[in-house]
Amino acid sequence: MMDDWEGKHLVIVGAARQGLALAKYLSKHDVKITITDQRDEKVLYAVQQDFQEGEINWVLGGHPVEILDDADLLSLSGGVPLTIPLVQEAIQREIPLTNDSQVFMDIVPCPVIGITGSAGKTTTTLLVGKMAEDAFGENHTWVGGNIGNPLIAVVDQIKKNDISVIELSSFQLELMNTAPKIACILNITPNHLDRHGTMQEYTRAKARIISYQSESDIAVLNREDEGSWALWSEVQGQLITFGLDRPKTGIAGTYLNGEMVSYWDGSSTTDLVPVGSIRLRGDHNLMNTLAACAVARAAGIPAESMQNGVEALSGVDHRLEYIRTWNEADWYNDSIATAPERSIAAINSFTESLVLLAGGRDKDLPWNDFSKLVLGRVKYLILFGEAADLIERALQSESENGEITIPYQKYASLKEAVHKAADIAESGDVVLLSPGGTSFDEFIDFAERGEKFRKWIQELS
């Protein structure tokens, strides 16, 4: 398949993790690479210095359409919208669009498990990865994708008898026309509407993970999520489901069976994992475990390995991640919560008094339910970033007479918000960063935001 790439010219938009990984891989396979980014050479100097593979043409400080003149393909990094002039010009010229995940899917020699959803996909991907590692061995299991590790970087090391588990975002899926052998849609709720415009378009992007499957493939859907379950009629092959209640006769899937996660094959039950084995905090992680077990069942992973995988995962970076206890308050990093719904799940994971840090950049999502919960549950609210005023207005609209009934402050930056939290947190409090917005007003991605938060917390003295 790599023979098809030889001598081609690929323009990569965005010098971020995914684009750089693709450039490093393809530059070793006689592909001409141009990387373009809106940031200038000063900002990207370290990135360029770190890039030793092949000859790369760097076009920085903008995206001039002239770079398409001899381009064969245009690859978009995750955060690049289809609406920018360069992409629209490529579409006009009928230059194919691609991304690192599509290239990976085209050339990977082993079966692929793909997981997507509005919430929970990182945790579920890691759970399935741990289960697969226990069943098939760490040397034969590859976990990555949108989760932080673009697997295109290691595709040459992957063997036919291995298994890959990848997290796929709607940004990646909207350009893809190759489906995983096992594809899971955890849920579809309002998210990324600033990018996709409507729920219909967002749903269509997610649905592509099963749209290109064959009759021999397996789709895993959430029986109890309206968005996921609405796609059951598009399943090409076998359907396996998950949810809290036992499936109806004739439908196979995992469910909560007392204190066990069990599997119903349509007529009988098999116990898989004791609920007590789940080490991740929050009710939403029970659903993630049910999903992971359904995917593992589809992959032929035995129940013992499912339980060992569940027990092996006690936390996820930037997802309700405990940082430290300082001044007798516990500090948690939930930077991965980039939608109000995710922050709601995080808040509901605690019973302690909460000092909440929320904000970042809005994604054109409703803040009403978030505001109702915050007003009744949070001790002190610290808003930061571009979305601070928007969240304040949502809180006012949910308050009697427009008066916000809990103490709060607004700051331009997350660092200022951290310093305020350090001033007011008391013994027994939980200080929780669960933004509800993206990181792009201040940071490259949610991981950088979480790492900075971690660093500033560790520096408190």
Image (tube, helix red, strand yellow):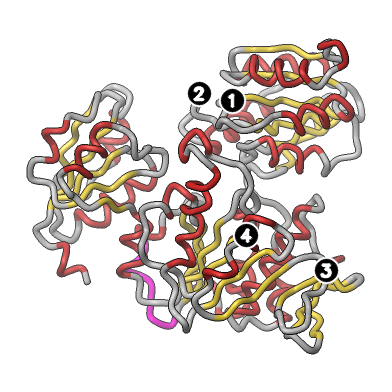
**Whole-Å distance between the Cαs marked 4 and 2?**
30 Å
Find residue 130 and report its horizontal and vertical position in percent: 62, 67
Could you tell which of marks 4 and 2 lies nearer the N-terminus? 4
Where, by quadrant of the figure, is residue 343 drawn? top right
Whether the residues at callouts 1 and 2 have beta carbons within 8 Å, the answer is yes
Could you tell which of marks 3 and 2 lies nearer the N-terminus? 3
Q: Amino acid at mark 3?
A: Asp
Whether the residues at callouts 4 and 1 have beta carbons within 8 Å, the answer is no
**Whole-Å distance between the Cαs marked 3 and 2?**
41 Å
**Whole-Å distance between the Cαs marked 1 and 2?**
6 Å
**Whole-Å distance between the Cαs marked 3 and 4?**
16 Å
Which residue is labeled 3 in the image? 245
Which residue is labeled 1 in the image? 360
Which residue is labeled 4 in the image? 228
Q: Amino acid at mark 4?
A: Ser
Q: Which residues are magenta?
A: 154-161
Whether the residues at callouts 3 and 4 have beta carbons within 8 Å, the answer is no
